[in-house]
Image (tube, coloured by chain):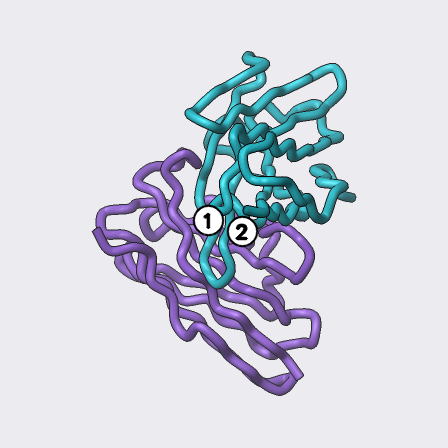
Amino acid sequence: EAGVAQSPRYKIIEKRQSVAFWCNPISGHATLYWYQQILGQGPKLLIQFQNNGVVDDSQLPKDRFSAERLKGVDSTLKIQPAKLEDSAVYLCASSPGSSYNEQFFGPGTRLTVL
Amino acid sequence: DQQVKQNSPSLSVQEGRISILNCDYTNSMFDYFLWYKKYPAEGPTFLISISSIKDKNEDGRFTVFLNKSAKHLSLHIVPSQPGDSAVYFCAASAGGNTGKLIFGQGTTLQVKP
C-alpha cells in the first residue's frame, strides 16, 4: 500500500513570495490533515478535511494560508505571502476515519523562508 | 500556552535497559493521549495510545502510564533497542480519539549499542 505522498520535499523562497505544497493521501482515506512543525516544537494542526469539507481550520492563519481538497482526494496548502516565521516542516496526514490510531503521516515538506 | 510539555529534550540509554520518556499536561479536559515516533526525514508514526479511563496500556515492549491526578504520562520502552533511537512526541486530545491533537515538543531518544 502506497503511503502519503508530499511534494516538494524541500523549498527555499524569499519572504513575500508565494509557495504551494501538494499532498496525495492514502487511497480511500476520508480524513486529511495539514500540520506545521517549527524546529524544536511538536506538530500543530493547521486544517483538517473530512472528504472535501473542512472540519477544523481554527489554527490556520487565513490572511496568508489557504488549503483546498478538491474531489476529496489530493490537497494543496498555499502560503501567500510568506513570512520568515513560516519556515517549518509542513506535514500532511490521512486516516480512513477520524481516529488518530489510524493516522498516517507523509514525509513532510521543509520550507525555508529567507 | 504550552498545554503539553516534554521537559527533557533528549535522553540517552544503553541497549537492553529501560527508556522512560515523560510528558506533562495542563488541560484537565484532555481525555485521550498518544505517543508518536519520528525518524529523521520521515513523518511521525503512531506508536501507542491511552484513554483517560485507564492508567496503563501495554503493547509489546511499549507501555504508557497515565497519572491523571498529576497530569503526567510516561512511555516505557523495555528493553530498549538501537532501532528505537528517534524523536518521541506525546500528544493529547480533549475530544477522545478524534478531537484536535495538541503535541509536546518532543524528546530525542538515543539508544547506544
Chain letter of mark 1 equals A
Q: Could you tell me if the residues under marks 2 and 1 are in contact, i.e. CB atoms within 8 Å?
A: yes
Residue A83 % position (x, y): 67, 76
> Quadrant of the image for the C terminus of chain A?
bottom right
Residue at image mark 2: A57
Chain painted in purple in the figure = A
Q: CA distance from mark 2 to mark 1?
A: 6 Å
Total number of numbered labels?
A: 2
Name the amino acid type tagged 1.
Answer: Gln
Residue at image mark 1: A48
| Vertical side of A68 occupied by B86: above or below | above
Q: Residues within 10 Å of mark 2 (few under 14, many from 20)?
A: some
Residue at point 61%, 46% (across, down): B109
Residue A75 % position (x, y): 37, 62
| Vertical side of B6 occupied by A89: above or below | below
Name the amino acid type tagged 2.
Answer: Asp
| Vertical side of B6 occupied by A107: above or below | below
Rendered colour, chain B: cyan
- Asked which secondary structure carries label 1, the reply is strand
Q: Is residue B30 left or right of residue B61?
A: right
Residue at point 66%, 62% (across, down): A39
- Asked which secondary structure carries label 2, the reply is loop
Between discs 2 and 1, the one toward the N terminus:
1
Quick one: B70 or B38, which is closer to the camera? B38
Residue A78 % position (x, y): 49, 71
